[in-house]
Amino acid sequence: MGIEEKIDIDVFKVVTRAIAEAENLELMTGHLSQLLVVALGIKGCSIFALNHESQELEILGSFGLSVGYVNKGPVLSAKSIARTVKGEPIVVTDTSNSDLLQYPQEAIVEGVRAVVSLPITLHGRVIGALRLYHYDVWEVSERDLDSLMLLAEIIGLALMYTRLRYALLSVKETTNEIHTVWLEPFGV
Amino acid sequence: MAAQKLLLPYNFSDSDRKALDFAVSTFGHRDDIEVTIFHAHTPLPSIDVSSETVTGRLSQNINYLSQKVSEVETSLQEVKAELVRRGFSNDRVKLKFKPRKKEIAAEIIDLHAGEKFNLLVLNRKAGRIGRFFTGSVHAKVAAALRNATVCIVC
């Protein structure tokens, strides 16, 4: 029997629409996490940004994971499913039988049996990771993995858009603070 | 009636925990301070698709989302219980748990506009990449407020 495919065009449509329609990054990452959890029937989802200075993956948004698991400690890109930051999608089908996790014991306590980690890239560089957590052993089909990779690329674009929007808003706020006296030298 | 109103935004992070510890050690012994613990959760997404297949599948699991949101509210009640255990009287600790409509800084500013807090205890973790995308919550809040004292725990 083949591996069940969970992502079809309708699921993809719902999830990408959540990205497109969110008014800010917090809502975007939150809704995206929620929708992936319900659409795939999994335990949880996290979206990380890679801090290139500290080499930590910092959570931008997550859903379905306990407070204790989210705060388990710094997620180091070199120790936690490390090949993701080299741009590869990684599927840990069974966490009880894998040496790829930084916090294997915490995963067991949390009830995380499988993890799918996908690089979020921009212009070919890794800027974050999308991680999906399942409470059962999980074989992911090639097609679903392709869809998730594409989704991670869209998240990368959305992150860039968010950054540019924030830059624009900052410029707008700064210009709004300029009194007209500085702009009208002839006292119009 | 408490003479001072303190707002403590709380998102269950290590930095939020530090801010809570600061609030307890600095204000816990005073009985003229009322604390409001504030958490804005991600609201459930509206699912509007034409395909009955996907709507059906999502709605089957939507209860899971509601359950998880309830768990967050329960966790917030545990934070209140901790404040009470550590010195605040029960009637001086309030909870504000609401769906997030705006970014968190704007939610805090709106809440302050309505309730006129005297004190806000915020936190800041150095070097966070998240600020690169959305800016700093504490900076936005501090810049927007008038007639309030803002404590930033680093």
Image (cartoon, rainbow, N blue to C red):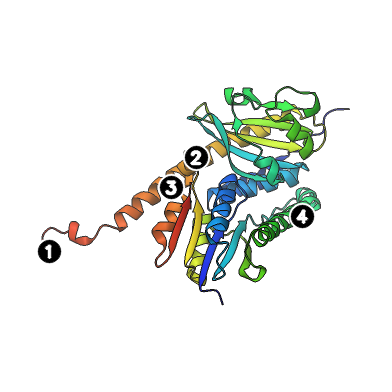
Residue B106 percent location from the top left of the image:
49, 59
Decide: few, some or many residues near mark 1? Use Cα within 10 Å; few <14, some 14-19, many ≥20.
few
Label 4: which residue?
B67
Taking the view exactly as shown, the residue that stands out farthest to the bottom is B1
Label 1: which residue?
A187
Decide: few, some or many residues near mark 2? Use Cα within 10 Å; few <14, some 14-19, many ≥20.
some
The reply to the same-chain question for discs 2 and 1 is no
Q: Are marks 4 and 3 in contact (CB under 8 Å)?
A: no
Decide: few, some or many residues near mark 4? Use Cα within 10 Å; few <14, some 14-19, many ≥20.
few
Is residue A21 left or right of A99 when viewed as pictured?
Answer: left
Residue A89: numbered disc? none
Q: Give the alpha-carbon distance from disc 3 to disc 1, as whole Å.
A: 33 Å
State the residue in front, A80 or B150: B150
Q: Give the alpha-carbon distance from disc 2 to disc 3, as whole Å.
A: 16 Å
**Of the two numbered discs 4 and 3 in the rendering, the one whose residue sits closer to the viewer:** 4
Residue A9 percent location from the top left of the image:
70, 41
Label 2: which residue?
B128
Is residue A51 left or right of B54 when viewed as pictured?
Answer: left
The reply to the same-chain question for discs 3 and 1 is yes
Label 3: which residue?
A166
Q: Which residue type carries mark 3?
A: Tyr
Q: Which residue type carries mark 1?
A: Gly
Q: Which quadrant of the structure image shows residue A113? A: top right
Q: Which residue type carries mark 2?
A: Arg
Q: Are marks 2 and 3 in contact (CB under 8 Å)?
A: no
